[in-house]
Image (cartoon, helix red, strand yellow):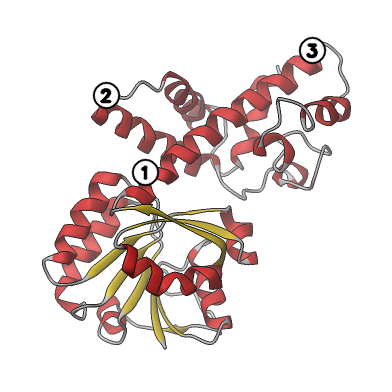
Amino acid sequence: MKIGFIGLGNMGAPMAKNLAKNGLDVLGFDTDNSIKLPEITMMPSIPAILNEVDIVFTMLPSGLIVKEIVSEFINNFNAESTLIDCSTIDVKTTKEVCQTLSNKKVNMLDAPVSGGVQGAKSGSLTFMVGGSRDDFDQLRFLFEYMGSRSVYCGENGSGQTAKICNNMILGVTMIATCEAFALADKLELDREAMFDVVSTSSGYSWSMNSYCPAPGVGPKAPSDNNYIPGFSSDLMLKDLMLSQNAASETKASTPMGDLAMTLYKDFVENKNGSGLDFSAILKTFEV
Protein backbone atom coordinates (compact mmCIF):
# COMPACT_ATOMS: atom_id res chain seq x y z
CA MET A 1 0.00 0.00 0.00
CA LYS A 2 1.47 3.35 -1.06
CA ILE A 3 0.98 6.42 1.13
CA GLY A 4 2.08 9.97 0.32
CA PHE A 5 3.48 12.28 2.99
CA ILE A 6 4.08 16.00 2.33
CA GLY A 7 5.99 17.89 5.02
CA LEU A 8 8.80 15.96 6.69
CA GLY A 9 9.85 18.30 9.47
CA ASN A 10 10.15 17.64 13.20
CA MET A 11 6.65 16.12 13.34
CA GLY A 12 6.13 14.80 9.82
CA ALA A 13 9.37 12.82 9.55
CA PRO A 14 8.79 10.54 12.57
CA MET A 15 5.12 10.13 11.64
CA ALA A 16 6.09 9.02 8.14
CA LYS A 17 8.73 6.69 9.56
CA ASN A 18 6.14 5.01 11.77
CA LEU A 19 3.92 4.40 8.75
CA ALA A 20 6.87 2.83 6.94
CA LYS A 21 7.75 0.70 9.98
CA ASN A 22 4.29 -0.84 9.72
CA GLY A 23 4.91 -2.10 6.22
CA LEU A 24 3.61 0.76 4.10
CA ASP A 25 5.43 2.14 1.07
CA VAL A 26 5.72 5.84 1.96
CA LEU A 27 6.47 8.40 -0.74
CA GLY A 28 7.68 11.66 0.78
CA PHE A 29 8.27 15.27 -0.21
CA ASP A 30 9.60 18.29 1.61
CA THR A 31 10.74 21.68 0.36
CA ASP A 32 14.00 21.07 2.23
CA ASN A 33 15.80 18.95 -0.34
CA SER A 34 18.51 18.02 2.16
CA ILE A 35 16.13 15.75 4.09
CA LYS A 36 17.08 12.11 3.56
CA LEU A 37 15.07 9.39 5.30
CA PRO A 38 16.13 5.80 4.60
CA GLU A 39 12.65 4.49 5.38
CA ILE A 40 10.96 6.90 2.94
CA THR A 41 11.07 7.05 -0.87
CA MET A 42 11.79 10.74 -1.44
CA MET A 43 9.98 12.16 -4.48
CA PRO A 44 11.07 15.15 -6.60
CA SER A 45 7.73 16.99 -6.49
CA ILE A 46 4.22 17.01 -5.05
CA PRO A 47 2.59 15.91 -8.35
CA ALA A 48 4.99 12.95 -8.43
CA ILE A 49 3.42 11.82 -5.13
CA LEU A 50 -0.21 12.63 -5.92
CA ASN A 51 -0.11 10.75 -9.20
CA GLU A 52 1.04 7.60 -7.38
CA VAL A 53 -1.18 7.40 -4.28
CA ASP A 54 -4.79 7.45 -3.18
CA ILE A 55 -4.01 8.53 0.39
CA VAL A 56 -1.76 11.49 1.18
CA PHE A 57 -0.88 13.06 4.52
CA THR A 58 0.15 16.67 4.97
CA MET A 59 1.94 18.09 8.01
CA LEU A 60 2.56 21.74 7.21
CA PRO A 61 3.19 24.97 9.18
CA SER A 62 0.17 27.04 8.13
CA GLY A 63 -3.27 27.02 6.60
CA LEU A 64 -2.04 29.26 3.80
CA ILE A 65 0.47 26.63 2.67
CA VAL A 66 -2.12 23.83 2.84
CA LYS A 67 -4.51 25.94 0.77
CA GLU A 68 -1.84 26.86 -1.77
CA ILE A 69 -0.81 23.23 -2.27
CA VAL A 70 -4.39 22.06 -2.76
CA SER A 71 -5.20 24.93 -5.12
CA GLU A 72 -2.06 24.46 -7.22
CA PHE A 73 -2.15 20.68 -7.48
CA ILE A 74 -5.88 19.94 -7.32
CA ASN A 75 -5.81 18.33 -10.77
CA ASN A 76 -3.06 15.94 -9.70
CA PHE A 77 -5.21 14.29 -7.05
CA ASN A 78 -6.76 10.99 -8.11
CA ALA A 79 -10.56 10.93 -7.99
CA GLU A 80 -11.88 9.32 -4.79
CA SER A 81 -8.47 9.75 -3.15
CA THR A 82 -8.18 11.15 0.39
CA LEU A 83 -6.15 14.00 1.84
CA ILE A 84 -5.46 13.65 5.57
CA ASP A 85 -4.24 17.00 6.85
CA CYS A 86 -2.47 16.71 10.21
CA SER A 87 -1.40 20.37 10.27
CA THR A 88 -2.87 22.66 12.91
CA ILE A 89 -4.66 25.39 10.93
CA ASP A 90 -7.76 27.54 11.21
CA VAL A 91 -11.21 26.01 10.87
CA LYS A 92 -12.28 28.36 8.08
CA THR A 93 -9.37 27.35 5.83
CA THR A 94 -9.98 23.68 6.56
CA LYS A 95 -13.57 23.96 5.38
CA GLU A 96 -12.51 25.91 2.27
CA VAL A 97 -9.91 23.29 1.36
CA CYS A 98 -12.45 20.54 1.95
CA GLN A 99 -14.87 22.20 -0.46
CA THR A 100 -12.18 22.64 -3.12
CA LEU A 101 -11.31 18.95 -2.89
CA SER A 102 -14.93 17.85 -2.81
CA ASN A 103 -15.53 19.63 -6.12
CA LYS A 104 -12.97 17.24 -7.62
CA LYS A 105 -14.42 14.21 -5.83
CA VAL A 106 -11.47 14.07 -3.42
CA ASN A 107 -12.16 13.27 0.25
CA MET A 108 -10.56 15.03 3.21
CA LEU A 109 -10.01 14.37 6.88
CA ASP A 110 -8.66 17.12 9.12
CA ALA A 111 -6.60 15.29 11.74
CA PRO A 112 -4.42 17.57 13.88
CA VAL A 113 -2.40 15.90 16.59
CA SER A 114 -1.50 16.24 20.24
CA GLY A 115 1.65 14.81 21.76
CA GLY A 116 4.48 16.87 20.30
CA VAL A 117 7.74 15.65 18.81
CA GLN A 118 8.21 12.94 21.44
CA GLY A 119 4.74 11.62 20.76
CA ALA A 120 5.47 11.56 17.03
CA LYS A 121 8.70 9.65 17.59
CA SER A 122 7.19 7.13 20.00
CA GLY A 123 3.99 6.65 18.02
CA SER A 124 1.83 7.83 20.91
CA LEU A 125 0.07 10.81 19.30
CA THR A 126 -3.61 11.59 19.75
CA PHE A 127 -5.45 12.42 16.51
CA MET A 128 -8.53 14.64 16.55
CA VAL A 129 -10.36 13.86 13.31
CA GLY A 130 -13.03 15.71 11.35
CA GLY A 131 -14.71 14.55 8.15
CA SER A 132 -16.77 11.59 6.96
CA ARG A 133 -17.33 8.94 9.60
CA ASP A 134 -17.00 6.25 6.93
CA ASP A 135 -13.63 7.64 5.81
CA PHE A 136 -12.46 7.76 9.40
CA ASP A 137 -13.51 4.17 10.08
CA GLN A 138 -11.87 2.95 6.88
CA LEU A 139 -8.55 4.72 7.51
CA ARG A 140 -8.38 4.57 11.29
CA PHE A 141 -5.68 1.90 11.15
CA LEU A 142 -3.27 4.50 9.73
CA PHE A 143 -3.71 6.68 12.82
CA GLU A 144 -3.05 3.64 14.98
CA TYR A 145 0.32 3.17 13.25
CA MET A 146 1.32 6.69 14.36
CA GLY A 147 -0.57 7.19 17.60
CA SER A 148 -2.14 5.67 20.66
CA ARG A 149 -5.55 7.23 20.15
CA SER A 150 -7.74 8.70 17.42
CA VAL A 151 -11.01 10.46 18.22
CA TYR A 152 -13.73 11.12 15.66
CA CYS A 153 -14.94 14.66 16.36
CA GLY A 154 -17.55 15.26 13.64
CA GLU A 155 -17.76 16.94 10.25
CA ASN A 156 -14.81 18.63 8.52
CA GLY A 157 -13.32 21.33 10.75
CA SER A 158 -14.23 19.52 13.96
CA GLY A 159 -10.75 18.10 14.36
CA GLN A 160 -9.21 21.55 14.13
CA THR A 161 -11.82 22.91 16.54
CA ALA A 162 -10.95 20.26 19.12
CA LYS A 163 -7.23 20.95 18.71
CA ILE A 164 -7.37 24.71 19.25
CA CYS A 165 -9.72 24.34 22.23
CA ASN A 166 -7.43 21.72 23.77
CA ASN A 167 -4.33 23.87 23.30
CA MET A 168 -6.05 26.96 24.65
CA ILE A 169 -6.60 24.97 27.87
CA LEU A 170 -2.99 23.81 27.76
CA GLY A 171 -1.62 27.35 27.37
CA VAL A 172 -3.76 28.68 30.22
CA THR A 173 -2.92 25.82 32.61
CA MET A 174 0.80 26.06 31.89
CA ILE A 175 0.78 29.76 32.78
CA ALA A 176 -1.21 29.06 35.97
CA THR A 177 1.28 26.30 36.88
CA CYS A 178 4.23 28.66 36.34
CA GLU A 179 2.59 31.42 38.38
CA ALA A 180 2.02 28.97 41.23
CA PHE A 181 5.68 27.89 41.24
CA ALA A 182 6.77 31.53 41.24
CA LEU A 183 4.51 32.31 44.19
CA ALA A 184 5.70 29.20 46.05
CA ASP A 185 9.31 30.33 45.48
CA LYS A 186 8.56 33.74 46.98
CA LEU A 187 7.02 32.07 50.00
CA GLU A 188 10.05 29.76 50.29
CA LEU A 189 8.15 26.55 49.68
CA ASP A 190 10.36 23.73 48.40
CA ARG A 191 9.54 22.97 44.76
CA GLU A 192 9.51 19.22 45.33
CA ALA A 193 7.01 19.69 48.15
CA MET A 194 4.95 21.94 45.91
CA PHE A 195 4.88 19.26 43.21
CA ASP A 196 4.08 16.45 45.66
CA VAL A 197 1.07 18.33 46.99
CA VAL A 198 -0.36 19.78 43.76
CA SER A 199 0.18 16.65 41.64
CA THR A 200 -2.01 14.66 44.03
CA SER A 201 -4.54 17.36 44.90
CA SER A 202 -7.13 19.53 43.20
CA GLY A 203 -4.43 21.47 41.32
CA TYR A 204 -3.62 18.33 39.31
CA SER A 205 -3.08 19.01 35.58
CA TRP A 206 -1.09 17.61 32.67
CA SER A 207 1.10 20.74 32.81
CA MET A 208 2.05 19.93 36.39
CA ASN A 209 2.04 16.13 36.49
CA SER A 210 3.47 15.15 33.10
CA TYR A 211 5.24 18.26 31.83
CA CYS A 212 6.37 20.13 34.91
CA PRO A 213 7.96 23.50 33.97
CA ALA A 214 10.27 23.47 37.02
CA PRO A 215 13.59 21.67 36.39
CA GLY A 216 14.36 18.64 38.52
CA VAL A 217 10.79 18.18 39.67
CA GLY A 218 8.46 15.37 38.62
CA PRO A 219 8.92 13.15 35.55
CA LYS A 220 11.53 14.09 32.96
CA ALA A 221 10.37 17.00 30.80
CA PRO A 222 11.90 19.69 28.54
CA SER A 223 12.58 21.77 31.65
CA ASP A 224 15.21 19.15 32.56
CA ASN A 225 16.91 19.59 29.17
CA ASN A 226 17.39 23.38 29.00
CA TYR A 227 13.88 23.73 27.60
CA ILE A 228 14.76 22.19 24.24
CA PRO A 229 11.28 22.06 22.71
CA GLY A 230 8.94 19.15 22.82
CA PHE A 231 6.34 21.75 21.87
CA SER A 232 7.77 25.20 21.24
CA SER A 233 6.56 28.54 22.56
CA ASP A 234 6.25 29.66 18.94
CA LEU A 235 3.77 26.86 18.21
CA MET A 236 1.84 27.55 21.41
CA LEU A 237 1.53 31.18 20.34
CA LYS A 238 0.34 30.08 16.90
CA ASP A 239 -2.35 27.83 18.40
CA LEU A 240 -3.50 30.47 20.87
CA MET A 241 -3.80 32.97 18.03
CA LEU A 242 -5.91 30.44 16.11
CA SER A 243 -8.17 30.00 19.13
CA GLN A 244 -8.58 33.73 19.62
CA ASN A 245 -9.25 34.38 15.95
CA ALA A 246 -11.97 31.72 16.12
CA ALA A 247 -13.32 33.28 19.32
CA SER A 248 -13.49 36.65 17.61
CA GLU A 249 -15.27 35.22 14.55
CA THR A 250 -17.85 33.41 16.68
CA LYS A 251 -18.12 36.09 19.38
CA ALA A 252 -17.10 33.59 22.07
CA SER A 253 -15.89 34.96 25.40
CA THR A 254 -12.39 33.62 26.14
CA PRO A 255 -10.66 36.15 28.42
CA MET A 256 -8.19 33.63 29.83
CA GLY A 257 -7.30 32.39 26.37
CA ASP A 258 -6.78 35.98 25.23
CA LEU A 259 -4.52 36.74 28.18
CA ALA A 260 -2.52 33.54 27.58
CA MET A 261 -2.03 34.60 23.96
CA THR A 262 -0.82 38.04 25.07
CA LEU A 263 1.65 36.56 27.55
CA TYR A 264 3.07 34.06 25.05
CA LYS A 265 3.33 36.76 22.41
CA ASP A 266 5.39 38.89 24.77
CA PHE A 267 7.51 35.87 25.75
CA VAL A 268 8.24 34.90 22.14
CA GLU A 269 8.77 38.37 20.72
CA ASN A 270 10.32 40.30 23.61
CA LYS A 271 11.74 37.88 26.18
CA ASN A 272 13.84 35.41 24.17
CA GLY A 273 11.18 32.72 24.31
CA SER A 274 11.35 31.88 20.61
CA GLY A 275 12.92 28.46 20.06
CA LEU A 276 12.33 27.33 23.65
CA ASP A 277 9.74 24.90 24.92
CA PHE A 278 6.42 26.50 25.88
CA SER A 279 7.01 25.53 29.52
CA ALA A 280 10.00 27.92 29.56
CA ILE A 281 7.53 30.75 30.15
CA LEU A 282 8.24 29.98 33.82
CA LYS A 283 11.28 32.23 33.35
CA THR A 284 9.06 35.30 32.99
CA PHE A 285 7.61 34.76 36.47
CA GLU A 286 10.92 34.04 38.19
CA VAL A 287 11.67 37.70 38.98
Residue 81 can be seen, yes or no: yes
Earlier in the chain: of badge 2 and badge 1, it is 1
Residue 287 — which label? none
Residue 6 can be seen, yes or no: no
Q: Is residue 177 left or right of residue 29?
A: right
- The structure residue drawn at horizontal position 46% and vertical position 36%, both measured from the top left corner, is 237
**Residue under numbered circle 1:** 161
Q: Position of residue 236 (x, y in %)?
A: 50, 39
Hey, which residue is sitting farthest left in the picture? 103
Q: In whole angstroms, how far apart are the C-alphas of marks 2 and 1?
A: 15 Å
The 10 Å Cα crowd at callout 2, few under 14, some 14 to 19, many 20 or more, is: few
Q: Position of residue 241 (x, y in %)?
A: 38, 34
**C-beta proximity under 8 Å, tags 1 and 3:** no
Q: Position of residue 79 (x, y in %)?
A: 18, 79
Hey, which residue is sitting farthest top in the picture? 187
Q: Nearer the viewer's eye, disc 1 or disc 3?
A: 1
Q: Is residue 121 left or right of residue 109?
A: right
Earlier in the chain: of badge 1 and badge 3, it is 1
- Is 259 situated above or below 264? above
**Residue under numbered circle 3:** 186
Q: In whole angstroms, how far apart are the C-alphas of marks 3 and 2?
A: 38 Å
Residue type at numbered disc 2? Lys
Earlier in the chain: of badge 3 and badge 2, it is 3
- Dot 1: element: helix
Work out whether residue 169 or residue 14 is closer to the camera in this orientation and state it. 169
The 10 Å Cα crowd at callout 3, few under 14, some 14 to 19, many 20 or more, is: few
**Residue under numbered circle 2:** 251
Q: Is residue 69 left or right of residue 129?
A: left
- Dot 2: element: loop
